[in-house]
Amino acid sequence: MSGNNAVSFKAWGVIGSIILLALALAGCKDVGSPEVVKIGLIAPFEGPSRPLGYDTLNGVKLRIDQWNERGQEPKIELVALNDDGDPELAAKLPDQLAQDPDIHMILGPPQGHTAMAALPALQTHDIPALLLAPVRSVPADGLILPFSGVGAHYQKLFQPMFGILPPAWSQPVNQPSIWLGDPLTLAQIHLESPELIKAAGPVAGEEALEGWAPGLTWSIPWAAPIPKDLPESFAQDYEALAGKPPNYAATLAYAAADEAIRLITSAADYRPDNEALKQVHIPPIGIVNSHLIK
């Protein structure tokens, strides 16, 4: 073998080693640093509705933790912002979340009055959203899904019992209605003019009501989304995380997070489109205390 050939073989050996090292490093990067996709959450973490916010947070967190603990990719991170139960603040938070390019979906808010307030801002951004509280409507060709239903769903549900009742999110309420707004106003109307609120949506299940109108939750017919096909271990896993059994808000949040992860991971670029959202089934809405219906 000539000297030149020996040098040539040595050169190819060095190049081959560099290529193998590069492949090894690339492999380590894929295993150790998977792409991160973020889910945004808007909910009340301070103020009277703080329990609702943390029920929602823990439901979402449980599902994301389960995904990450199984080593599935992409890794999912949660960015949770406090709306304080304040519609003016809730209206600003979608803009804050949209500043992070890694946020591929938004969940919440879980209250009707803040969901209604956040809806216009959510519609201005190209980020899919699953709403956790009922709203009047959403554009059929947009990226927002009313995961907690719209007012017409609640109207149809209660119609056989009460006739046609208009859904209401804000004052004034001048005729018998289905209240889908905030808990404080629900308590005030119920105490001052109980005949105006014949039924309510998920807001009637909030813990905050007990302080303002004790016993209201179980004295008025109310309805909420009831997700099906949850894992058998859901209640046990949730209680292990949150220290208490899951309620309707925690259950809905878990189901929404599960659907968000499915949508994200099914999309080629982790960004679900309008067609993908059209395939999502909104959880059935059921009357929680139907024994009150005569």
Image (cartoon, helix red, strand yellow):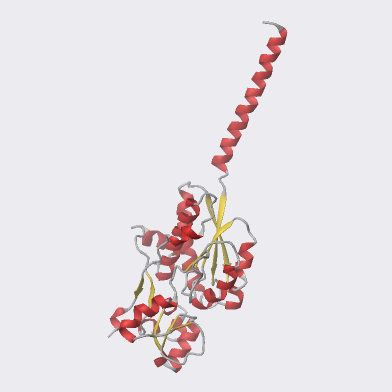
When asked about the image quadrant of residue 118, the answer is: bottom right
Q: Position of residue 264 (x, y in %)?
A: 50, 54
Q: Is residue 115 above or below residue 280?
A: below
Q: Position of residue 71 (x, y in %)?
A: 48, 46
The residue sitting at 61% across, 63% down in the picture is 97
Q: Is residue 4 left or right of residue 208?
A: right
Q: Position of residue 43 (x, y in %)?
A: 53, 70
Regarding residue 154, the answer to whether it shows in the image is: yes
Residue that extends furthest to the top in the rendered view of this protein: 1
Image quadrant occupied by the C terminus = bottom left
Q: Is residue 48 left or right of residue 249?
A: right
The residue lying toward the viewer, choosing from 168 and 141, is 141
Q: Is residue 55 left or right of residue 290?
A: right
The residue lying toward the viewer, choosing from 152 and 254, is 152
The residue lying toward the viewer, choosing from 42 and 143, is 143
Image quadrant occupied by the N terminus = top right
Residue that extends furthest to the front in the rendered view of this protein: 141
The residue sitting at 55% across, 50% down in the picture is 269
Q: Is residue 116 left or right of residue 147?
A: right
The residue sitting at 50% across, 84% down in the picture is 184
